[in-house]
Image (cartoon, rainbow, N blue to C red):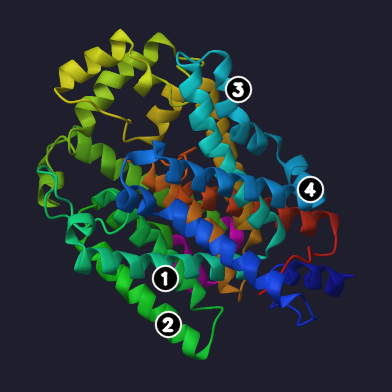
Amino acid sequence: MYSSSVNRDMAAFAPPSRAPLSLTWDWAEKSFIVFALVMFGTSFLRLFVGGGENTAVVRITYLSLYAAGGMLCVLHYRRVLEVIRQSPVFVLLLLFPLLTILWSVNQEETLQRSIAVLGPSLLALYIGTVYRLRSIILLLAAAHLIMSIMDVFAIVAIPKIGITQEEEWHGAWRGVHGHKNGFGAAAAFGCLALLFATTVVEGFWRIVTLAGLALNLVFLAVSDSLTSQLVLPMALGAFVVGLGRGWSRLYVFLLAAGLCCVLLVIVLIAQYGPGALIGALGRSSTMSNRMPMWSELTSVIAQRPMLGYGYAAFWESGLPELHRVARNLQFVPFYSHNGALELLLDGGFVLLMTALVAMLSCMVRASRMIRPGIISSYYPLAFFIGFVLANVSESTFLARNSLLWIQFVLFAAVAIRTVHIKIVGQAPLDGERL
């Protein structure tokens, strides 16, 4: 009995079998997934085609990726439904942007932006449901390697695109990510993906992943994104300490929660205490105007605290409140630079509580996935820690067309599926193809 249970636990992380498969479809599917991850992880189309998200090429590309992700979910609907049934709060979080159409101050904008969240989420749900963790690590590593090469090309060969030309951040590297913060986030989470990839590959490919890891570390070091530079070491803290000491899953989870609290305290001290700490790190005492914005948005949120203004609706509402915020700040913001505030604007206290419960559930499940001796099993928890920390000064929860949001959904699906397999004693899913 014990041996059977251990075998089931290990199966989710075990190397794949070498049964004959259709290589043509296999590689076509994996190539499509990597392509989609690269498209959602960069601003390549918007930068090189121009015209923003509303150009025909950009819209058609994104809609095609949404449709393909939806079709893949339909083809494997039984597995997808099995994962969905295990976590109603996770499903509610995915559908909440669409629900906000009922009370949105700009229903058309909410509908369009909700599709841009749900579409990538379907693709992520498919990947996290069908592929095992080892395969997901390799797919993410491949996508980050390609993005790194694209970044180098843009910075070296086309500096007008790869290096920020705007006056405020002139000279900051952005690669093919459209903004310095996106460049920094891609480097931080790229380091995470490539680091864990080195544990599941050997020989030549390990050298390749190590080279990619080194390149992303350089990108992170030179990026003008303090948030990303803090996220990576904190996200790896629980992994390194827990792995080195052989701690139980409970201790690793508690350490992860503790590290989140420590960073939150540091950020709060830096924001509301003397500005010397932030100044020493090369930032203004207002954190690049984030603090005045947060103060203004607090009063705006208080006017619709329970359900908010509708997903992505406030920034396109034309409401007097938005004009007042822009007038007081003396610039026009387009998002809040804080995950909690953005959720409160989109769906109020109800959405914020839904997101917190879903996040806590994901972290608990990820901690239960950890298997001593299997380094890759730490990846979901390390990612979730980094994801939470990134939302202190950015907003990646329910972000549209975002690789970070895709990773959140797919790792949540992996955690739900893997823990469910362990509890009910089912055979592991056989979608592994790598």
Distance CA(mark 1)–CA(mark 3): 37 Å
Taking the spot 27% from the left edge, 26% from the top edge, the residue there is 294
Badges 3 and 4: C-beta atoms under 8 Å apart? Answer: no
Q: What percent of the width, then of the height, locates residue 331?
A: 17, 26
Position of 369 relative to 290 (above/below): below
Badges 2 and 3: C-beta atoms under 8 Å apart? Answer: no
Distance CA(mark 2)–CA(mark 1): 9 Å
Residue position for label 3: 99
Query: Disc 2 residue type?
Result: Val
Residue position for label 2: 208
Mark 1 crowd level (few <14, some 14–19, many ≥20, 10 Å Cα): many
Q: Which of marks 2 and 1 is nearer the N terminus?
A: 1
Query: Disc 3 residue type?
Result: Leu
Taking the spot 51% from the left edge, 64% from the top edge, the residue there is 140
SS of the residue at dot 1?
helix
Q: Quadrant of residue 355?
A: top right
Magenta highlight range:
238-250
SS of the residue at dot 3?
helix
Query: Disc 1 residue type?
Result: Leu
Residue position for label 4: 77
Image-based side of 248 in relation to 345, left or right: right
In the foreground, 274 or 361: 361
**Overall secondary structure of the magenta section:** helix
Which label sits on residue 145?
1
